[in-house]
Image (cartoon, grey):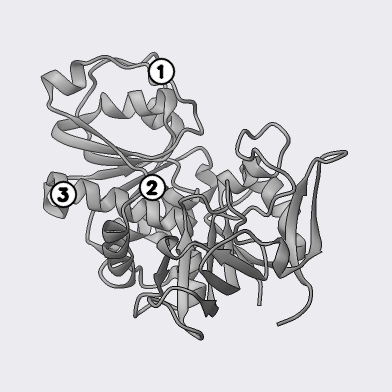
């Protein structure tokens, strides 16, 4: 074990700063499992944690990063052993507990899961929380009755991490995927992920909007929220559903009860943070098997070292990334 290792530290003890700094093991918070981190990834929440008014962090200094994969160095919990490949995402990681933007992390055992067979540590972080959220969305829709032979499925925010992962997973399962994006210049990228059609943001939510509109899709994966979600709900076919996980367009949804009581549409909330471990394990198993796209590499915007994280965090907040930014730590 090195005496010092590198981590991205957010601090505002004097002036607000985001910088890669040396850290010691003694500075890591309590937890049963010490992990030598191999990879992390950049999420919108990580971007918010890197700005003064992001409303994510309460204590400083802090190491953000809601995702990590790596090798167990030591464990006080018998479920994990030295040399084991593991994943840790969500819960308090990167929000209230030091996260994955560090060469070493100490994590509570109840937040750690073994790397599923069929995934590498790198592939697990190509997915990260974004891919896990997409997989949860697909699972929720299929539990509701969504199936490839019942019609088209819409994915909003399709060039983002959740949206791109959902496009690739649904296409892998044989769905006709309509991918909606505010960046139509990325149509070729979305088609490479498996989108059968690419729609502009205006195609989905432009105009004055109606409580009920033409029925276009059997279901949708929405990572946007706000007024666009209201527009999507108005265009879901009878008995369909929307799996909602995002709020980049706002938290207020200006809709009525009409889609719910006249068409039987269901709004399915997707929470990847506090998802029970039993369900989490099942979802990750699906991500390693039937939901795994033929090439996860297509989801990568770029792979960066820890030193390039500050600019990558700024990029995700300004919508200058496409798909996933992978962070290499060892």
Q: Name the secondary structure under disc 3.
A: helix
Disc on the earlier residue, 2 or 3: 3
Q: Which residue is mark 3?
A: 143
Question: Mark 3 and mark 2 in contact (Cβ < 8 Å)?
Answer: no
| Residue closest to the eye, 272 or 180 | 272
Helix, strand or loop for disc 2: loop
Q: Which of the two discs, 3 and 1, labels the residue nearer the N terminus?
A: 3
Relative vertical location of residue 120 with respect to residue 222 in this rendering, above or below: below
Indicate left or right for 281 with 128 as reference.
left
Q: Nearer the viewer, mark 1 or mark 2?
A: 2
Measured in 3D between alpha carbons, the distance from the residue under mark 3 to the one under mark 1, in whole angstroms, is 32 Å
Pick the residue in front: 225 or 198.
Answer: 225
Q: Residue at x 60, y 55 (%)?
A: 65
| Residue 321 spot, x, y in % from top left | 61, 51
Q: Circle 1 sits on which residue?
A: 207
Asked if residue 30 shows in the view, the reply is yes
Res 191 → quadrant: bottom left
Q: Is residue 146 visible?
A: no
Q: Secondary structure at mark 1?
A: loop
Between the residue at mark 2 and the residue at mark 3, the CA separation in whole angstroms equals 19 Å
Categorize mark 1 by other alpha carbons within 10 Å: few (<14), some (14-19), many (20+). few
Instruction: Say which mark, if any, is on residue 274.
Output: 2
Residue 250 in picture, x, y percent from top left: 49, 26
User: Does the CB distance between marks 3 and 1 fall below 8 Å?
Assistant: no
Mark 2 nearby-residue class (10 Å; few <14, some 14–19, many ≥20): few
Judged from this view, the residue extending furthest toward the bottom is 83
């Amino acid at each position: 074990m090195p005496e010092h290792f590198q981590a991205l530290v957010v601090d505002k003890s004097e002036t607000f700063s985001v910088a890669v700094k040396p850290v010691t093991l003694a500075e890591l918070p309590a937890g049963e499992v010490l992990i030598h981190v191999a990879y992390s990834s950049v999420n919108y929440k990580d971007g918010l944690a890197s700005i003064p008014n992001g409303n994510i962090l309460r204590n400083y200094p802090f190491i953000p990063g809601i995702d990590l994969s790596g090798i167990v160095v030591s464990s006080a919990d018998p479920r994990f052993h030295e040399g084991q490949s593991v994943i840790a995402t969500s819960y308090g990681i990167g929000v209230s507990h030091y996260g994955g933007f560090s060469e070493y992390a100490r994590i509570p055992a109840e937040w750690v899961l073994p790397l599923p067979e069929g995934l590498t540590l790198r592939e697990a972080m190509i997915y990260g929380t974004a891919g896990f959220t997409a997989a949860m969305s697909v699972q929720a829709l299929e539990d509701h009755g969504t199936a490839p032979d019942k019609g088209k499925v819409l994915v909003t925010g399709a060039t983002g991490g959740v949206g791109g992962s959902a496009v690739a997973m649904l296409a892998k399962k044989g769905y006709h995927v309509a991918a909606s994006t505010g960046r139509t210049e990325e149509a070729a990228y979305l088609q490479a992920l498996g989108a059968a059609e690419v729609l502009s943001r205006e195609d989905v939510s432009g105009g004055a909007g109606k409580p009920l509109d033409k029925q276009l899709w059997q279901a949708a994966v929405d990572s946007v929220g706000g007024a666009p979600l209201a527009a999507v709900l108005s265009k879901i076919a009878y008995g369909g559903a929307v799996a909602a996980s995002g709020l980049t367009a706002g938290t207020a949804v200006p809709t009525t009860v009409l889609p719910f009581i006249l068409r039987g549409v269901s709004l399915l909330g997707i929470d990847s943070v506090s998802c029970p471990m039993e369900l989490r394990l099942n979802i990750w198993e699906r991500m390693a098997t039937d939901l795994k796209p033929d090439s996860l590499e297509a989801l990568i915007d770029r792979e960066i070292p820890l030193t390039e994280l500050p600019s990558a965090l700024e990029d995700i907040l300004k919508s200058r990334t496409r798909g996933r930014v992978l962070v290499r730590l060892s």
